[in-house]
Amino acid sequence: MIIPRPTYLNQLIKAQGNRMIKIITGIRRCGKSFLLFDLFHNYLRSTGVNEAHIIEIALDDRANIEYRDPDRILAYIKERITDTERYFVLIDEVHMIRDFVEVLNSLLHISDLDIYVTGSNSRFLSKDIVTEFRGRGQDIHMYPLSFYEYYNAGGGDRSLRWREYSTYGGLPQILSLPDDKMKRDYLIHLADTVYLQDVVERNHIRNKPELDELLKILASSIGSPCNPTKLSNTFKSVKKVTISNKTVSKYLEYLCDAFLVEKSLRYDIKGKKYINTLSKYYFTDVGIRNAVLGFRQLEPTHLMENLIYNELLYRGFSVDVGVVSSIDKNESGKSVRREFEVDFVANDAYTKYYIQSAYSIPDHDKMIQETNSFRRIDDSFHRIIIVRDDVMPHRNDDGILIIGLFDFMLKPEILKEV
């Protein structure tokens, strides 16, 4: 099954000839190798690039073991260059080369050589990897399949496909597995023996069970504000384990660095500043989140919120959690300070969107609850509520746009049309 992935392919196409190393990063098994060796390779051939001008090396292939030596791979690439036309170097699992940063920087000195690489070991998954190239690397970050990509790959009933997607996530391999048991086993194996092990090895963690417990706590509370101190207290009260907030803070950093979870900061909308006391953490792939919990706690409201967050990132937005403070009168007439939350403040280069995720709005009271924060914002940016119900997009009396989940997920340009 071929899934086009145009979002990432177009980034590679636009980056051609920019004299930078194109570094494809992302969580393991999200499709980096397929993007490079199949989709991009086929694009190059379709535009008339001679096959001899595409130097393709898969370093996880035993047949290419000699090219893991830095001097040997440099010599091999230079031997392949026989004219002055542009050559494309595509290297998969580049971290398997000893001193791979030096190798790639050396390749930049070869005239008209366009370099594209992927990597998936624990070090290469670091968000810092591009900095090792001192401004000569361009990060093209991949996410698992969006629901649009997932649904278009198989079609069918949207509700059934959503149930699959919110249970097993968007790693491409999931689409080729024939039954629920194989999907669950695959994800449980990845969560424990691949992803978590990457974090342990990269950061020399001696107490893996602590990290495992932290991941379970995060998985159980997606969308809940937390910080290292709060999580440390949870360890003490629920797990009966003492872990310092400094250790929790480091573990959180490691998990984010490996793209397992994403941290969303809280933003004071009226004060236009970030609030560092609490943050929210969402899973890059909800299938991995569910596997961490043994496919228990499949709360549709929380999974929907996580998937909307992921979709916004996939579309290129920077996403924060909004906080609106106001002074209101309580029942005794006394002034009290209250905080209202906006699930997501999504920013791109052109505008800003305030977005609430609401599984359902069955009555007027629920609508009041969901719009409390919106009614206290005094700017003119877009206000949107995404509901699970398949409703026609419409605005309520306050001018707030109500759109159904499937319209949001399956129409990538819908926010630009509001």
Image (cartoon, rainbow, N blue to C red):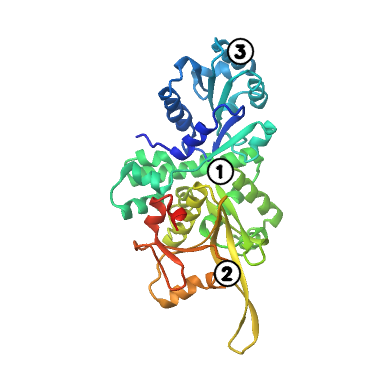
Instruction: Say which quarter of the image contains residue 241.
Output: bottom right
Upstream in the sequence, badge 2 or badge 1?
1
Q: Amino acid at mark 1?
A: Leu
Classify mark 1: residues with Cα within 10 Å, few (<14), some (14-19) or many (20+): some
- Return the x and y of residue 64 as percentages of the image width and height: 52, 18
Which residue matches tag 2?
A: 377
Identify which residue, 413 or 205, lies in the foreground: 413
| Vertical arrangement, residue 28 with respect to residue 116, above or below | below
Upstream in the sequence, badge 2 or badge 3?
3
Classify mark 3: residues with Cα within 10 Å, few (<14), some (14-19) or many (20+): few
| Vertical arrangement, residue 327 with respect to residue 190, above or below | below
State the quadrant of the C terminus: bottom left
Classify mark 2: residues with Cα within 10 Å, few (<14), some (14-19) or many (20+): some
Q: Nearer the viewer, mark 2 or mark 1?
A: 2
Which residue matches tag 3?
A: 75
* Outermost residue to the left: 156
Total marks shown come to 3
